[in-house]
Image (tube, rainbow, N blue to C red):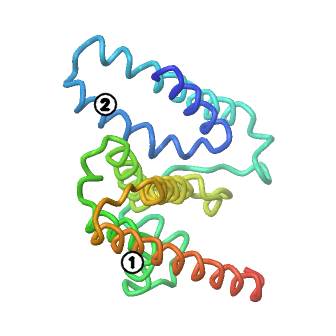
Amino acid sequence: MDILLALLLVGSAVFKPSYAFAFVPAYGLLYALQVRFRFKALVRLAVPLLPVVLLIIGQVLWSLAHQEVMLDGGESHIVFALRAGWHTFVPEFTVGHILGSFVSSFALPALAYLICPHWLRRPSHHLALLSVAFGMVIFMFVYETGIRATHGNLVWQVVAANHILHWLILVEIFFWKTTTRVHYWQRAALLGFVGVSVVCAFVHMARLARIGA
C-alpha cells in the first residue's frame, strides 16, 4: 500500500505539484501520530513522501536554472504574510463574502459529520481534513510575487483537497447501508443536499460563462 500510495503521489505531483504542499504535510503528520515515531514505520513513511519531495525540489531547481522558460523572463518570489491568498486572489471580498464562501464550500462535510460523526474516526477522513487545513494555512500565509503572482500555485491545493474531501463523503453516502428508518432519511437528506449543491454549482458556472469570467 505504501508503494501504491507513492506512485499515486508522484503521479499527482507531476500533473499538479502544488497539491503536494497540502497532502505531504497532512500525510506526514497523520502517519507520525499513527506510528508514534517508530523507526521502521518512519522508514515506510519515507517511501511515499521522499519521491514527491525530491520531485518538487527537482522542479524548483530546474526552474531556477532555466529562467528563459518563465513568462516574460521575470522573477517570482515567495512572501509570507497573513491573509496572503485573500489579498492576492479575492481582494475585493469582505469578511462576509469569505464566510459565505466557507459555508458554501464546507456545508456538505459539516452536515455529513453532524449526521455521521463516526466517519471522523477513519484515517481517510483525517487525511482529507488535514489536507484541507494545511492547504488553507498555506493559502492564508504564503503567496508569490512578480509575474506568477496570480498563477495559483499556492491556491489549487485548497481546491484539490476540498474536492477529495467531498468525493470521500460522496463515496460514504452512496455505500452507506442504512439499517433503520432514521438512517434512511438521514441518507436521503444528505443526497438531497448533494443535489442542491450540484445545481448551485451549475448555476454559478453558467453565470461565470455569461459574464466571460
Classed neighbour count for the residue bearing mark 2: other residues with Cα under 10 Å, few (<14), some (14–19), many (≥20): some
- In terms of depth relative to the viewer, which is nearer, 186 or 181? 181
Which structural element holds mark 2? Answer: helix
Residues under numbered marks 1 and 2 in contact, where contact means CB atoms less than 8 Å apart: no
Q: In this view, does 13 lie above or below 184?
A: above
Query: Looking at the image, which residue is at 47% across and 77% down?
Result: 192
**Amino acid type, mark 1:** Val
Split into 4 quadrants, where in the image is the C terminus? bottom right
Instruction: Please provide percent x and percent y for residue 164.
Output: 50, 53
Residue 187 position by quadrant: bottom left
73 left or right of 123?
A: right
65 left or right of 76?
A: right
Which structural element holds mark 1? Answer: helix
- In terms of depth relative to the viewer, which is nearer, 149 or 135? 135
Instruction: Please provide percent x and percent y for residue 77.
Output: 56, 50
Classed neighbour count for the residue bearing mark 1: other residues with Cα under 10 Å, few (<14), some (14–19), many (≥20): few
Query: Looking at the image, which residue is at 61% across and 34% down?
Result: 60
Instruction: Please provide percent x and percent y for residue 71.
Output: 78, 52
Query: Looking at the image, which residue is at 57% across and 32% down?
Result: 8
Give me the disc on residue 103: 1
* Spatial separation of the CA atoms under disc 1 and disc 2: 29 Å
Disc nearer the start of the sequence (1/2): 2
Which residue is disc 2 drawn over? 31
**Amino acid type, mark 2:** Tyr
Query: Looking at the image, which residue is at 48% across and 54% down?
Result: 171
Instruction: Please provide percent x and percent y for residue 154.
Output: 53, 54
Q: Residue reaching furthest front?
A: 180
| Number of numbered labels in the structure image | 2
Q: Residue reaching furthest top?
A: 40
- In terms of depth relative to the viewer, which is nearer, 55 or 91? 55
